[in-house]
Image (cartoon, rainbow, N blue to C red):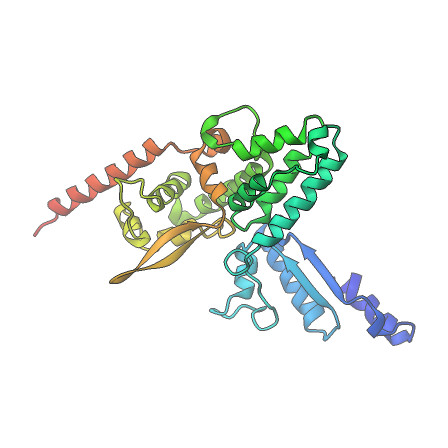
């Protein structure tokens, strides 16, 4: 970065051949999380700070990324992240309501698809239907990734966009049809989940822990599907004979998809798993979509029941 940007820029300024005020100031970096490996992501952020921010250059840097470890650590206030004082952090998942933007995006892009289509139904001014757009916006849960995936699927030119859109609108994980309109989104989910699994199981203290089984256990617990009740995340970790904070370790590389949030349940604060995007919850529930990453609900319930029985046995076997 120093060789490609900083030094050439300084040489131009020193030569008098450049008016710094007329030079483009914006540098946009999209998909920081796509850099291979956390160390490379951290190195890029450190290089941005050292070369661009610490050199008092006129550049303004915009970084878009899922909130994975490297960028979260750099932006954290405690302990002090090295970009905390220098960056303005926009949390799209939990602060920004993108509903209207998604609605406009879907209307514009689907109308463009319709105009290019050979299907006269798609070229009609009545397509797409308002109620279909409403369903898609609601399903998107504020996440552009869903809307973009829908548009990509509907844009497939070998079939009618009208039929494809209807497939998406009517599709549910239980139907198990051969068409998989969310395949691109599922590939993204599978990649994130597989990487998190690998990192979790590589840590010595986590060896022997079944990452997918534990994640599914918290997932099912969050939806009142374990004996018709829901446990606080700390208590649930202890039921599974894990450390009280084990749930945070479990999702340390899944913060772009899930989070544990406090729910004020009188007289105490209840910690529960929350999904940024409901399609990920549906992905975990569907063997068709999750494929090799799928864990059956019956297996999870057997695991929880076994942990409860073992806990009871330990309680009664301990000397009084």
Q: Is residue 178 visible?
A: yes
> In terms of depth relative to the viewer, which is nearer, 187 or 137?
137
Image height check: is 99 above or below 183? below
Report which quarter residue 20 is drawn in.
bottom right
Q: Position of residue 313 (x, y in %)?
A: 15, 41
32 horizontally vs 142: left or right: right
**In the image, what residue occupies the spot 68% across and 71% down?**
53
Residue 34 seen anywhere in this rendered image of the structure: no
Q: How many marks?
A: 0
- Image quadrant holding the N terminus, namely bottom right
| Residue 145 rendering spot, x and y as whole percentages | 59, 46
What residue is shown at x 57% (from left), y 35% (from top)?
182
Asked if residue 68 lies left or right of residue 127, the reply is left
Q: Closest to the observer: 40 or 95?
A: 95
Q: Please provide percent x and percent y for residue 86.
A: 61, 71
In front: 103, or 215?
103
Q: Is residue 231 left or right of residue 53?
A: left
Residue furthest top in the image: 178
Q: Residue furthest left?
A: 320
Instruction: Name above or below for residue 119 compared with residue 3.
Output: above
**Which residue lies at the image location 72% right of the left edge and 29% below the top edge?**
120
Q: Position of residue 105 (x, y in %)?
A: 65, 48
Comparing 199 with 300, the one in front is 300
Residue 8 figure quarter: bottom right
């Amino acid at each position: 970065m120093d060789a490609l940007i900083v030094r050439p820029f300084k040489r131009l300024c020193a030569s008098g051949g450049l008016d710094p005020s007329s030079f483009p100031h914006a540098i946009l970096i999209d998909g920081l999380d796509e850099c291979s490996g956390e160390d490379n992501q951290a190195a890029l952020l450190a290089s941005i700070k050292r070369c661009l921010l610490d050199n008092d250059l006129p550049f303004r840097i915009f970084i878009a990324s899922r909130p994975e470890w490297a960028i979260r650590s750099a932006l954290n206030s405690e302990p002090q992240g090295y970009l905390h004082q220098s960056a303005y952090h926009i949390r799209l998942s939990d602060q920004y309501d993108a509903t209207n933007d998604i609605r406009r995006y879907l209307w514009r892009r689907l109308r463009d698809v319709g105009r290019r289509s050979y299907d006269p139904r798609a070229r009609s001014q009545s397509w797409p239907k308002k109620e279909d757009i409403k369903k898609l916006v609601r399903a998107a849960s504020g996440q552009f990734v869903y809307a973009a995936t829908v548009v990509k699927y509907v844009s497939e030119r070998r079939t009618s966009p009208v039929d494809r859109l209807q497939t998406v609108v009517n599709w549910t994980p239980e139907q198990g049809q051969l068409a998989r309109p969310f395949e691109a989104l599922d590939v993204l989910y599978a990649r994130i989940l597989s990487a998190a699994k690998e990192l979790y199981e590589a840590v010595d203290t986590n060896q022997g822990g079944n990452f997918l089984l534990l994640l599914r256990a918290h997932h099912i617990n969050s939806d009142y599907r374990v004996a018709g009740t829901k446990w606080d995340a700390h208590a649930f970790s202890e039921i599974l004979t894990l450390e009280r904070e084990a749930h945070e370790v479990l999702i340390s590389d899944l913060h772009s998809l899930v989070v544990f949030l406090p729910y004020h349940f009188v007289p105490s604060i209840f910690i529960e798993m929350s999904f940024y995007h409901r399609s990920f919850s549906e992905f975990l529930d569907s063997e068709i979509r999750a494929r090799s990453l799928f864990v059956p609900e019956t297996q999870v319930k057997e695991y929880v029941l076994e942990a409860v029985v073992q806990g009871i046995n330990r309680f009664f076997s301990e000397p009084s």
